[in-house]
Amino acid sequence: MNDSSDKPLLEMIGISKSFGGVQALRDVDFSLYPGEIHGLVGENGAGKSTTMKIIAGVHHGYEGVMKIDGREVHFRSARDALDAGVGMVHQELSIVPDLTVAENVFLGVQPVTSFGTVDWGRMVRESREHLSRLGIDVDPRTTIGDLPIGLQQLIEIARVLSSGARIIILDEPTSALSPPEVERLFGMLRKLKADGKSIVFISHFLDDILSISDKVTIFRNGRKVLTAKVSEVDKRGVIENMIGAGHRGLEESYTGEIKLDTPFDAPVVMEADKISYERAFHDVSIKVRSGEVLGIYGFMGCGQLELARALFGKIRADGTITVAGKPLKLTRTSIAREEGIAFVPESRRAMLFHHEPLYKNMSISILERISKWLLKPSSERQIAERHIQNLRIRTPGPNQLLGNLSGGNQQKVALAKWLTHAPKVLILSEPTRGMDVGAKEDVVRIVRGLRNEGIAVVVVSTEPETVLSLADRILVMKRGEIVREFAGDTVSKDRLLEAA
């Protein structure tokens, strides 16, 4: 770290922030010094992204004081923050893929001639010089969408820098990068640090944080619990501070050792053999057995969400997928449904109709079984009433509009959609995301009931508590590969975090 200044470039004092009555941050202090790479870690919802979005001008209306160069600032927009020298590169890149590298570097601030037209020559020349100073060797006239994702990320950082940013916030910058691309990014960050730039590095990948950062700050439950030099902490110490002793709700049952009751002798229902999809995952092989819940855990961007879609035919993966001994070509989701595969995605909006009654949402996938020619609302309502009772859906009745239900009850409707005719394989993507404790416990009960009926269940999640509460066997994914299996043994949350 550059020690030329003992005064922070950025300082946050007593920052608190609420959203709709929910406290996201509580009395947070944070300092960033010139020429420093500062890592931020914490579980989902711990407060790290909210803190950075306040710095970047995305969130305002907070309590506390923020200073840059010792002067108090109040940003009302990302433009305000950028004008003060703060730029943020989000996990979802904001490049325009059909434009050239030069056009992306100068997006919104194109140089113009004396006639008021875009000065294309100057734009290409200056972008080449700017990229070269950062160690990026690429033709500025290249369409940026044709470049590898790692190079696109470096160019987006270059764009933020070209606007004059002294503070660069990177949100999960390595989640979609290969190891060589990660090293290339780290090389660029070291150059920026040597030039006196200050970098905040948010990541779930603790190895990356500990490799590149000078300091690390750990968030838990909306509070800052520790700031330390990286040389003074190790991975296990970081994990222990992230998890802490004070868990709430469902998590209380899953903070210690969990014994996995893996059904090794049950028949295999679904098997995927060395399947790959673009950059998301490669050479992944899994088996899921009758009466088994297979948990697939990993951080955001590790490839598990794409894997779930591939197992249902929403995206077409290379390799072989077999159900009940029958090789399948999952070129479309209708084939998966016909072969007994059901899928509940992480986004309820992707599969439910919020302005339709609850009973229509439940029956949409089985209308042809109820009647080949005519709609039969009375039959649909009877089916819905049975699911309402069995799944404990809190609603006045089957005619209630789905949009009037809570998120947890909507998730139960999403499950009910597939349960009138039990599938062979049920794939659940983030099944408890955004739910309260009671709704999570209901989902756990439902999934365990399906397992006991002999259904093979695959649960993919970025939440360790969800996987620990449901799974009989757990696979850990990291950067598109299966890196660890827990089966027939004990497992804990910290061991999952260490493996990922």
Image: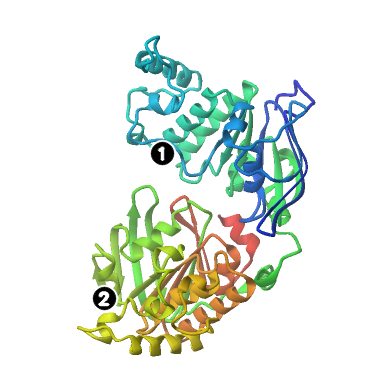
| 259 sits left or right of 177 in the view | right
Residue 432 lies, in percent from the top left, at 54, 68
Residue 260 lies, in percent from the top left, at 57, 75
CA separation in Å, label 1 and label 2: 36 Å
Q: Which disc is residue 149 wearing?
A: 1
- The reply to whether dot 1 and dot 2 touch (C-beta < 8 Å) is no
| 211 sits left or right of 366 in the view | right
Label 1, residues with CA under 10 Å away: few <14, some 14-19, many ≥20: some
Quarter placement of the C terminus: bottom right
Under mark 2, the amino acid is Glu
| Residue 153 in the image: above or below residue 349 | above
Label 2, residues with CA under 10 Å away: few <14, some 14-19, many ≥20: few
Quarter placement of the N terminus: top right
Name the residue: 42% across, 33% down: 151
**Mark 2 element type:** helix
Residue 384 lies, in percent from the top left, at 42, 85
Q: Which residue is mark 2?
A: 338
| Residue 488 in the image: above or below residue 429 | below
**Mark 1 element type:** helix
Under mark 1, the amino acid is Ile
Name the residue: 63% across, 56% down: 45
Residue sitting nearer the eye, 314 or 50:
50
Whichever of labels 1 and 2 marks the residue nearer the N terminus, that label is: 1
